Image (cartoon, rainbow, N blue to C red):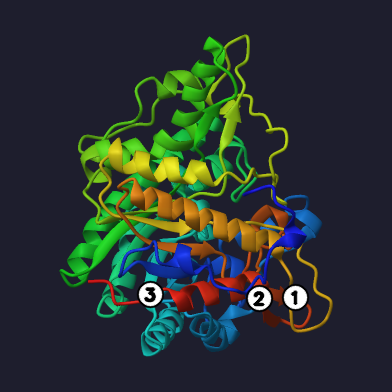
């Protein structure tokens, strides 16, 4: 983001014609959401309990004790919310399915009413000419499976594959784009390592074991989806990346930057793309490698059709004089840089560098930016407009970074802004707003922000054509 005065930005909803025309024909534009963050209706139509229901009900875990019981009530407002996609002019919608809504106990009897909800959503999207991108797991594990060990239990990998098959058989005649896991790094480390996410376990060894089973579940699910859907279907995974940059050229900084890269990026990237964990990773964590059965790494590295890339910021690393663990490297803020409400640095160049690296170093052939966005302190004056100039500038600069990655040869196929609407932001409750659509939580009123109008104008300038 440039340092120009926010108040001097020209008309915020005006299209960036020159920028829009740097993108190739067939580039896909969308927005993303996640089931627990938007659906609500946690006790309706046979839905089972998820680990996030349990975690949010535990005192002290969520800011202000807030939960996702209602959130933005998307379960009841789904059709109207999809109308917003059409109004903005989006060609694709990335949503996740709630595992406990479909298999309340994680396995066994299918809850048909749960599947019916997503069936209606897919039909409504297709009727509007919007391409559905279905994510099977965005962290809401059925509590019944957690009671049996959750992702630390190898059996959960197989239950996930069963769940993937159930969904693919029901929706596979209409959904062509599938994502197995969203950000398994977060599910493993934040859920089982430092415990700030559900299920709230603080055991770094458990995090490493959970990570392996998440990846195994991914590989098993890829095969099940392909067996259950037409040959034209595409299957991928969504990984989160936080590029690491050294703050200086001291040897200890270079060492710790490599540790940060292993921990934040390569831990999940290399098993998927190369069939192995990064050399020296478990030593750098001072942990025992997970139990890897014969054939596991081949399953995990089953070729995928695309990779989803979630990126919001970067880490700037300042080395410690004495050795530290890979998950304890010291990061610093950059003087003069702009930071979002999440205290994440705005640094579009790091997204460009990341996208180019995934192709040049790891050979990923089809990339989608599946999440990218910013939280700012949006204020509603009670009228029909939400002025979020900082988010407009963020979007403009990050789309320019995506364009630069394309010019440098990155095989990018599309971009999904996070998020379509304000929603429940996990352990931070409702304190952070990422949406290009404002939600007034007491009334559930939706208002497209200036950033959403800017995106709408930008897309109007881009000549959308179907992706082949």
- Helix, strand or loop status at disc 2: loop
From the top left corner, tell me how far across and down residue 135 is, in percent.
41, 64
User: Which image quarter: residue 103?
Assistant: bottom left
Query: Compared with residue 351, is residue 179 higher up or lower down, i.e. above or below?
Result: below
User: Looking at the image, which residue is at 53% across and 80% down?
Assistant: 88
Name the side, left or right, on which 263 lies relative to 409: right
- Helix, strand or loop status at disc 3: strand
Q: Nearer the viewer, mark 3 or mark 2?
A: 3
Q: Can residue 153 be seen in this view?
A: no
Nearer the N terminus, badge 2 or badge 1? 2
Which quarter of the rendered picture does the C terminus lie within? bottom left
| C-alpha separation, residue under disc 2 versus residue under disc 1 | 7 Å
Camera-side residue: 411 or 51? 411
Residue holding disc 1: 441
From the top left corner, tell me how far across and down residue 459 is, in percent.
47, 74
Camera-side residue: 46 or 357? 357
| C-alpha separation, residue under disc 3 versus residue under disc 2 | 20 Å
| Number of numbered discs | 3
Q: Can residue 66 be seen in this view?
A: yes
- Residue 132's tag is 3
Name the side, left or right, on which 303 lies relative to 335: left
| C-alpha separation, residue under disc 3 versus residue under disc 1 | 26 Å
Q: Residues within 10 Å of mark 2 (few under 14, many from 20)?
A: many
Q: How crowded is mark 3: few (under 14 residues within 10 Å), some or many (20 or more)?
A: many
Camera-side residue: 110 or 247? 247
User: Looking at the image, which residue is at 53% across and 29% down?
Assistant: 245
Nearer the N terminus, badge 3 or badge 1? 3
- Helix, strand or loop status at disc 1: loop
Residue holding disc 2: 72
């Amino acid at each position: 983001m440039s340092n120009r005065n926010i108040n001097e930005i020209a008309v915020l909803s005006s299209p960036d014609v020159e920028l829009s025309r740097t993108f190739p024909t067939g580039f896909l534009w969308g927005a993303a959401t996640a089931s627990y963050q938007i659906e609500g209706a946690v006790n309706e139509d046979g839905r089972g309990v998820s680990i996030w229901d349990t975690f949010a009900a535990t005192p002290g875990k969520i800011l202000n004790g807030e939960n996702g019981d209602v959130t933005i009530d998307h379960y009841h407002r789904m059709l109207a919310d999809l109308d917003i996609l059409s109004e903005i002019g989006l060609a694709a919608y990335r949503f996740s399915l709630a595992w406990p809504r479909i298999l309340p106990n994680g396995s066994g009897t299918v809850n048909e009413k749960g599947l019916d909800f997503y069936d209606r959503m897919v039909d409504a999207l297709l009727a509007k000419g919007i391409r559905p991108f279905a994510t099977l797991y965005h962290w809401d594990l059925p509590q019944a499976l957690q009671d049996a060990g959750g992702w630390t239990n190898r059996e959960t990998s197989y239950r996930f594959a069963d769940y993937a098959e159930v969904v693919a058989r029901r929706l596979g005649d209409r959904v062509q784009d599938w994502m197995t896991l969203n950000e398994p790094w977060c599910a493993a480390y934040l859920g089982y390592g430092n415990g700030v996410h559900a299920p709230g376990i603080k055991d770094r060894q458990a995090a490493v074991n959970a990570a392996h089973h998440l990846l195994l579940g991914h590989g098993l699910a890829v095969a099940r989806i392909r067996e259950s859907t037409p040959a034209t279907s595409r299957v991928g995974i969504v990984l989160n990346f936080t590029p690491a940059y050294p703050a200086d050229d001291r040897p200890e900084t270079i060492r710790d930057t490599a540790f940060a890269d292993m921990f934040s990026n390569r831990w999940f990237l290399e098993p998927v793309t190369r069939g192995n964990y990064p050399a020296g990773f478990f030593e750098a964590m001072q942990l025992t490698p997970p139990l890897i059965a014969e054939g596991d790494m081949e399953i995990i590295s089953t070729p995928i059709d695309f990779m989803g890339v979630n990126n919001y910021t970067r880490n700037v690393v300042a080395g410690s004089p004495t050795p530290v663990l890979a998950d304890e490297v010291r990061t610093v803020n950059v003087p003069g840089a702009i930071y979002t409400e999440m205290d994440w640095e705005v640094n579009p160049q790091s997204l460009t560098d990341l996208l180019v690296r995934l192709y040049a170093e790891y050979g990923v052939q089809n990339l989608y930016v599946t999440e990218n966005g910013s939280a700012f302190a949006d204020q509603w004056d009670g009228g029909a407009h939400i002025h979020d100039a900082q988010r407009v500038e963020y979007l403009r600069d990050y789309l320019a970074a995506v364009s630069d990655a394309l010019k440098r040869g990155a095989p990018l196929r599309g971009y999904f802004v996070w998020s379509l609407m304000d929603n429940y932001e996990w352990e931070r409750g409702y304190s952070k707003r990422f949406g290009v659509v404002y939600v007034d939580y007491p009334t559930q009123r939706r208002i497209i922000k200036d950033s959403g109008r800017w995106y709408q104008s930008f897309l109007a300038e881009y000549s959308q054509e179907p992706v082949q």
